[in-house]
């Protein structure tokens, strides 16, 4: 097998029937196998029910990616090794793709004029990573309000981001702001 890089891992896993709902790259997402860079090394750690355990530390990304690929495709990771390939419902489950948070927010009817992912922007809901912590807040007139600190848990930050924006949208609609204005892009 040829070496697998971080950029090639999603396509290789997709060809093996594994969607992005079951792994994460660069962030610790709940209920997935995470591959993270930690200083000069790479760490592979499954995260379930909020608990993360390092199962491998590697000197380069290729070793880490091969290990993630092997965990999934060799069925070392599944609870029932026999059920995965022969059971259609499990095959569909493992092929699930993760819906990116931006698409989730847009599906609520909120455009990019009102939210920002990865950077702080005034008069917008922000989801950012600062000093290793995932933060969600509303930046209003240069001040952070409604701050939620999710430490290292990106999945919790995503969920919080989506819920807060959904509630904010409802408040704005009740205050007379049009749905078209809320759906506006930057």
Image (tube, rainbow, N blue to C red):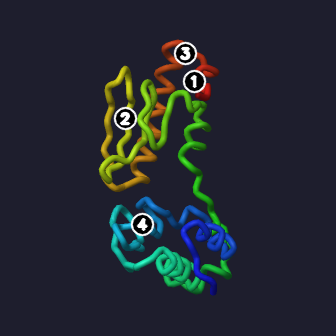
Nearer the viewer's eye, disc 4 or disc 1? Answer: 4
Which residue is at a point 36% across and 71% down the rendered structure image? 40
Secondary structure type for disc 2 = strand
Residue picked out by circle 4: 36
Mark 1, Cα crowd under 10 Å, few <14 / some 14-19 / many 20+, is some
Residue 63, how many percent across, how many down?
48, 81
Mark 2, residue position? 137
- Residue 52 visible to the viewer: yes
First in residue order: circle 4 vs circle 3? 4
Q: Residues within 10 Å of mark 2 (few under 14, many from 20)?
A: many
> Furthest-front residue in view?
40
Q: Earlier in the sequence, mark 4 or mark 2?
A: 4
Left or right for 152, reference 88: left
Of callouts 3 and 2, the N-terminal one = 2
Spatial CA span between label 3 and label 2: 21 Å
Instruction: Measure the C-alpha gap from mark 1 to mark 3.
Output: 7 Å
- In the rendered structure, which disc, 1 or 2, sits on the residue that comes first in sequence? 2
Q: Residue at x 38, y 23 (%)?
A: 140
In the image shown, does 178 or 12 lie closer to the viewer?
Answer: 12
**Residue with the mark numbered 1:** 182
Quadrant where the C terminus lies?
Answer: top right
Other-residue count near label 3 (Cα within 10 Å), few / some / many at <14 / 14–19 / ≥20: few
Task: Find disc 3 in the rendering and name its residue.
Answer: 177
Vertical comparison of 36 with 150: above or below? below
Q: Give the spatial CA distance, label 1 vs label 2.
A: 18 Å
């Amino acid at each position: 097998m040829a070496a697998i890089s971080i950029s090639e891992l999603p396509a290789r896993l997709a060809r093996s029937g594994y969607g992005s709902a079951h792994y994460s790259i660069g962030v610790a997402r709940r209920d997935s196998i995470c591959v993270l860079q930690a200083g000069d090394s790479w760490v592979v750690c499954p995260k379930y029910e909020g608990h993360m355990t390092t199962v491998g530390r590697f000197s380069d990304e290729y070793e880490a990616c091969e290990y993630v690929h092997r965990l999934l495709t060799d069925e070392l990771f599944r609870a029932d090794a026999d059920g995965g390939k022969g059971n259609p419902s499990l095959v569909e489950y493992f092929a699930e793709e993760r819906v990116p948070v931006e698409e989730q927010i847009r599906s609520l009817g909120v455009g990019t004029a009102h939210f920002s992912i990865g950077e702080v922007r005034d008069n917008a809901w922000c989801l950012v990573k600062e000093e290793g912590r995932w933060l969600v807040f509303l930046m209003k007139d240069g001040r952070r309000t409604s701050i939620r600190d999710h430490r290292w848990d990106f999945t919790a930050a995503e969920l919080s981001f989506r819920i807060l924006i959904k509630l904010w949208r409802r408040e704005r609609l009740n205050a007379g702001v049009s749905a078209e204005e809320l759906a506006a892009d930057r």
